[in-house]
Amino acid sequence: MKKWMYLIAPGLMLAGFFVLYFSHAEELHKKELAQKAKIEQERVEADTKKKVAETKAREDAKKRQEERDAEEKKKLDEKMARQAADDKRSAIRLRNTPPRRTPRPSRWPRSKSSSTASAKRRTRPVGKRSIWPSRWSSPVSLAVTPSSKSSA
Protein backbone atom coordinates (compact mmCIF):
# COMPACT_ATOMS: atom_id res chain seq x y z
CA MET A 1 0.00 0.00 0.00
CA LYS A 2 0.97 3.49 -0.63
CA LYS A 3 2.04 5.59 2.33
CA TRP A 4 0.22 8.71 1.18
CA MET A 5 -3.05 6.87 1.79
CA TYR A 6 -2.38 7.17 5.49
CA LEU A 7 -2.46 10.98 5.19
CA ILE A 8 -5.61 11.37 3.08
CA ALA A 9 -8.13 9.98 5.61
CA PRO A 10 -6.94 12.08 8.58
CA GLY A 11 -6.69 15.17 6.35
CA LEU A 12 -10.29 14.72 5.16
CA MET A 13 -11.47 14.26 8.75
CA LEU A 14 -9.58 17.40 9.84
CA ALA A 15 -11.16 19.41 7.00
CA GLY A 16 -14.64 18.18 7.99
CA PHE A 17 -13.94 19.07 11.63
CA PHE A 18 -12.91 22.64 10.70
CA VAL A 19 -16.06 23.13 8.60
CA LEU A 20 -18.31 22.00 11.47
CA TYR A 21 -16.29 23.87 14.13
CA PHE A 22 -16.31 27.26 12.40
CA SER A 23 -20.01 27.03 11.48
CA HIS A 24 -20.90 26.30 15.12
CA ALA A 25 -18.38 28.87 16.41
CA GLU A 26 -20.31 31.67 14.68
CA GLU A 27 -23.59 30.44 16.17
CA LEU A 28 -21.95 30.14 19.58
CA HIS A 29 -20.58 33.68 19.30
CA LYS A 30 -24.06 34.99 18.40
CA LYS A 31 -25.58 33.12 21.38
CA GLU A 32 -22.98 34.55 23.74
CA LEU A 33 -23.67 38.10 22.52
CA ALA A 34 -27.43 37.57 22.94
CA GLN A 35 -26.92 36.18 26.43
CA LYS A 36 -24.67 39.12 27.41
CA ALA A 37 -27.26 41.59 26.08
CA LYS A 38 -30.01 39.78 28.00
CA ILE A 39 -27.96 39.84 31.22
CA GLU A 40 -27.18 43.53 30.75
CA GLN A 41 -30.86 44.32 30.13
CA GLU A 42 -31.87 42.39 33.28
CA ARG A 43 -29.25 44.27 35.27
CA VAL A 44 -30.54 47.61 33.98
CA GLU A 45 -34.13 46.59 34.83
CA ALA A 46 -33.05 45.50 38.32
CA ASP A 47 -31.23 48.82 38.83
CA THR A 48 -34.27 50.82 37.76
CA LYS A 49 -36.53 48.73 40.03
CA LYS A 50 -34.07 49.26 42.87
CA LYS A 51 -33.97 53.02 42.27
CA VAL A 52 -37.78 53.19 42.14
CA ALA A 53 -38.03 51.18 45.36
CA GLU A 54 -35.43 53.41 47.05
CA THR A 55 -37.26 56.60 46.05
CA LYS A 56 -40.56 55.11 47.21
CA ALA A 57 -38.96 54.07 50.50
CA ARG A 58 -37.47 57.55 50.97
CA GLU A 59 -40.84 59.19 50.32
CA ASP A 60 -42.55 56.77 52.69
CA ALA A 61 -39.92 57.33 55.38
CA LYS A 62 -40.23 61.10 54.94
CA LYS A 63 -44.00 60.83 55.23
CA ARG A 64 -43.75 58.69 58.38
CA GLN A 65 -41.21 61.10 59.86
CA GLU A 66 -43.52 64.04 59.20
CA GLU A 67 -46.39 62.14 60.85
CA ARG A 68 -44.17 61.31 63.82
CA ASP A 69 -43.05 64.93 64.11
CA ALA A 70 -46.66 66.13 63.95
CA GLU A 71 -47.64 63.63 66.65
CA GLU A 72 -44.73 64.68 68.86
CA LYS A 73 -45.63 68.33 68.37
CA LYS A 74 -49.24 67.57 69.26
CA LYS A 75 -48.13 65.74 72.44
CA LEU A 76 -45.81 68.61 73.34
CA ASP A 77 -48.57 71.17 72.80
CA GLU A 78 -50.94 69.12 74.97
CA LYS A 79 -48.29 68.83 77.66
CA MET A 80 -47.59 72.54 77.56
CA ALA A 81 -51.34 73.28 77.75
CA ARG A 82 -51.69 70.99 80.78
CA GLN A 83 -48.66 72.62 82.39
CA ALA A 84 -50.08 76.08 81.75
CA ALA A 85 -53.41 75.01 83.25
CA ASP A 86 -51.64 73.56 86.30
CA ASP A 87 -49.58 76.73 86.65
CA LYS A 88 -52.71 78.82 86.43
CA ARG A 89 -54.47 76.68 89.06
CA SER A 90 -51.48 76.83 91.39
CA ALA A 91 -51.23 80.62 90.93
CA ILE A 92 -54.89 80.98 91.86
CA ARG A 93 -54.41 78.69 94.84
CA LEU A 94 -51.37 80.68 95.99
CA ARG A 95 -53.23 83.94 95.54
CA ASN A 96 -56.12 82.68 97.65
CA THR A 97 -53.98 81.44 100.54
CA PRO A 98 -53.57 83.88 103.42
CA PRO A 99 -50.06 85.10 104.17
CA ARG A 100 -48.19 83.52 107.05
CA ARG A 101 -48.48 85.25 110.33
CA THR A 102 -45.00 84.46 111.58
CA PRO A 103 -42.00 84.05 109.35
CA ARG A 104 -40.07 80.80 109.51
CA PRO A 105 -36.95 80.91 111.64
CA SER A 106 -33.81 81.14 109.60
CA ARG A 107 -31.17 78.44 109.99
CA TRP A 108 -28.25 80.56 108.79
CA PRO A 109 -26.45 82.42 110.33
CA ARG A 110 -26.91 80.73 113.64
CA SER A 111 -26.88 82.69 116.81
CA LYS A 112 -24.09 82.22 119.32
CA SER A 113 -26.33 80.51 121.82
CA SER A 114 -27.39 77.82 119.36
CA SER A 115 -23.81 77.21 118.18
CA THR A 116 -22.58 76.57 121.72
CA ALA A 117 -25.48 74.23 122.37
CA SER A 118 -24.70 72.28 119.23
CA ALA A 119 -21.02 72.20 120.17
CA LYS A 120 -21.96 70.65 123.50
CA ARG A 121 -24.07 68.09 121.73
CA ARG A 122 -21.22 67.17 119.36
CA THR A 123 -18.73 66.31 122.10
CA ARG A 124 -18.25 62.64 122.68
CA PRO A 125 -19.13 61.27 126.08
CA VAL A 126 -16.03 60.04 127.85
CA GLY A 127 -17.39 56.97 129.55
CA LYS A 128 -19.16 55.37 126.61
CA ARG A 129 -16.34 55.04 124.09
CA SER A 130 -12.77 53.91 124.29
CA ILE A 131 -10.01 56.44 123.90
CA TRP A 132 -7.97 53.97 121.87
CA PRO A 133 -8.35 53.95 118.08
CA SER A 134 -9.52 50.65 116.64
CA ARG A 135 -6.27 49.97 114.73
CA TRP A 136 -4.20 50.02 117.91
CA SER A 137 -4.40 47.31 120.45
CA SER A 138 -7.29 47.59 122.82
CA PRO A 139 -6.67 48.85 126.36
CA VAL A 140 -7.84 45.51 127.69
CA SER A 141 -4.83 43.72 126.21
CA LEU A 142 -2.45 46.30 127.69
CA ALA A 143 -4.09 46.30 131.07
CA VAL A 144 -2.32 44.44 133.84
CA THR A 145 -4.33 41.46 134.93
CA PRO A 146 -3.87 39.57 138.21
CA SER A 147 -2.64 36.48 136.37
CA SER A 148 0.15 38.47 134.68
CA LYS A 149 1.26 39.89 138.09
CA SER A 150 1.65 36.49 139.58
CA SER A 151 3.69 35.14 136.66
CA ALA A 152 5.98 38.16 136.54
Image (tube, rainbow, N blue to C red):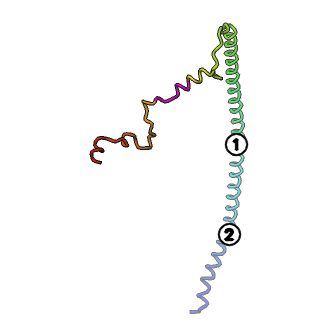
Query: In the picture, residue 7 is in which quadrant?
Result: bottom right
Q: Main secondary structure of the magenta part?
A: helix
Q: How many marks?
A: 2
Determine whether 80 is above or below 61 in the image. above
In front of the other: 145 or 101:
145
Residue 101 occupies quadrant? top right
Residue carrying label 2? 23
Is 120 a magenta residue? yes
Residue matched to label 1: 54
Magenta extent = 118-125
Residue shown at 60%/20% (left/top)? 113
Residue drawn at 67 percent across, 8 percent down: 99
Q: Secondary structure at mark 2?
A: helix
Q: The N terminus lies in which quarter of the figure?
A: bottom right
Residue 100 drawn above or below residue 144:
above
Quadrant for residue 37, please give it. bottom right
Give x and y (percent) for residue 55.
Answer: 72, 41
Three-letter code, disc 2:
Ser
Q: Helix or strand or loop: what does disc 1 sit on?
A: helix
- First along the sequence among labels 1 and 2: 2
Asked if residue 91 lies in the magenta stretch, the reply is no
Q: Nearer the viewer, mark 1 or mark 2?
A: 1
Q: Position of residue 143 (x, y in %)?
A: 36, 41
